[in-house]
Image (cartoon, grey):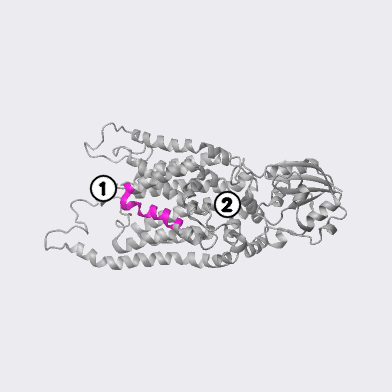
Amino acid sequence: MSASAEPAPSRARPGWPAWAVPGLLTLAITLVGLGHAQLWRDELATWSAATRPLPDLVRLTRTIDAATGPYYLLTHGWTTLVGTSPTALRLPSALAMAGAAALTARLGARLAGDRAGLLAGLLFAVLPATSRYGQEARPYALATLLAMLATLLLVDALRRPSRRRWAGYAVAVAALGLLHLIALTLLAAHAVAVLLTAARGPTAAGLGPADQPRPDVPDANSPGEPGVEPRHVAGEAREAPARGRRVFVRWLLALVPAVALVAPLALVALGQRGRQLDWVDPARLPDLASLPGGLAQSGVVGGFLLGLAALGAVRLGRRALLPGAAVLLPVLLLFVAGTVVPLWVTRYLLFVVPFACLLAGAALAAATPAGTRPALAGPPEPEPPGTAPPGARPGGTGLVPALAVVALVGLLGLPDQAALRRTHEWPRSAPVDYAGAAGIVAAGERPGDAIVYSPRDGWLFPDLGLAYHLGSGLPRDVLVVRDQRAEASLWATECGDPARCLAGVDRVWLVVAGRRADPLAAVPGAKGEALRDRFTVRQVWPRPGLTVALLAR
C-alpha cells in the first residue's frame, strides 16, 4: 500500500475520554464477579509465596519460581495491606487490565487515529481474556500493562527524543522483564521500529508525526527543482546518519537497566526450568492454529479478532509495522524456542493481545465515515468546507456500525465470560472444588483428627487449597515432617515411615485428586499400604476435581 493511501493519524492529542472510556469499561467488566471463582492452583501458589515472611520468600525463589519472584514480592506488600481474599488478591490485575485498555487506546490514537484507538480499547475491554487474566492473581495482566506502556513510550521517544522519554522507556522495559521474562520477546518488535527509524526516520517505521508537512515546506523526500537541492534538505541528509546512530545508541542504553536486573533472574530461572515447566509439552504446528482462541479465551472471538486484525494491517500499511511485529515476532520466537525447550504456554503471550486489538480497531475505523470523530474524543478539529461525507452527523454517529461490531464481539464472548467466573481451571469442564472439600472437613472435624493428601508432589496443590480455605482450622497434617515454608518450596516433605507417623491417630480425612469410588485404593506406595492396613472408609464425599473420605481406625 502506498504512503498516500495510508490513513493519517490523529492530528491532536486525544481528549481524555478517548482513552478513559475503554479503561473504565474494562474495569467495570472485570470487577463483575471478581471474587466469585475460587483461587485455582496457580493463584494458590501466589498466595502461598506472597504470605511467607520475606526471608522465606527469597529462599523460595532460589528453589523454584524465581521468574515470578518480583511479582510475589509486590503481592506480599499488597496482601499485607489489604488481606488475602480472592477479591483482594485479584484487584491489582483488574486495575492493570484497565490501564492496559487505556494505553491501547492511546497507542492506537498515535498510530492510526482517535477512532481506531477508541475502538481498539473497547475491543480489548470486551474480550473474555481481558476478564480472565484481569481476575487472576498472577503477573500476566501487569505484564500486559507494562508492554503497552513501554511501546507507547518508545513511540514517543522515537518521534520526539528526550532524556525523559528514554528514561521512562528504560524503566518500563526493566519492570516488564522483572514481571514476565517471556514478555521481553516484545523487544524484537521494538528493534524493528528502532532500526527503521535510525535508517530512514520515523515515517518509514510507521511512526511519523501526527501533523502532515505543510505544502509550502519542502519535504526531505521531494526532489525539488531540477539540479537544485534546497540547503536545509541537504543539511538534513548529511545529519541523517548521525541522527540514526544516536537513536540506536539511545535505545541500546535504555536496555542496560533491563539487562542488569533481568539477567541474574533469568539465569536462576533457567536452572529451575526442569521443575518449573515439567508439565509443558514441546510446541507443535497445531498449537499455532489454536493460539487465537486460547489467547482470547474463546475460539469464535479469537477467530473474529484475527480476521479483523488482518484487515486492519492491510488498511494501515506501514503504520501496521510496529503493532503487527508486536503480535507476530513474540509468537514466532516463543514457538521456535518451544520446539526445543518446554516454553510454549498460551497465556505467556497474553501481552500481544492489545496489539491485535489495535489492528482490529483500525479495521473497524475504516468503516467509520472520515468526517466523524469519537463522541468523547475531545475538541473536534475544524474540517475544511465540503469534506464531511454525506450522512455524517456531529457527535460521532458514524461510530455506530463499528460499535455494533464491538458489541457483537462482546455477545459472542458472553458464554466464556460466564464460564470463567465459575472456575479458572482449564479446561473449564474440569473444575477443582477446594472450597467444597474444605467445607466438608470443617463440618465433620473433631479434635485429634488428622488429614492426608494424595498426590502430594503434583501441581494440583490440594494441601494449599484446603489450607487457604480452612486456615487455623485445618486438621493436623500428620505425615508432614517439613512443610512448604521449611522446604523453601511449594511442596511439603512427608514422613518416610507412614505407618509410624499414623500411630495414635483414630480418624483421618483423606483428600485425593479426581473422583474416586474407592479413595483408599487410589493412594499409592507405602502411604497407601499404611492407610489400608490401619483404617477403613467411613464415608466418601465426591467433589469436582477432588474426593474427600473419612477414615476410621
Residue 188 in view (yes/no): yes
Circle 1 crowding by C-alpha within 10 Å: few under 14, some 14–19, many from 20 = few
Q: Position of residue 153 (x, y in %)?
A: 41, 56
Report if residue 474 lies within the magenta region: no
Q: Residue tagged by mark 2?
A: 138
| Residue 404 appears left or right of 435 | left
Mark earlier in primary sequence (2, 1) = 1
Check disc 2 and give the amino acid type.
Arg
Residue drawn at x 74%, y 48% as measured from the top left = 511
Q: Under tag 2, what secondary structure?
A: loop
Residue drawn at x 63%, y 53% as measured from the top left = 46
Circle 2 crowding by C-alpha within 10 Å: few under 14, some 14–19, many from 20 = many
Front: mark 2 or 1 = 1
Front-lying residue, 198 or 507: 507
Residue drawn at x 87%, y 55% as measured from the top left = 503
Q: Which residues are magenta?
A: 314-331
Q: Residue tagged by mark 1?
A: 5
Front-lying residue, 226 or 505: 505
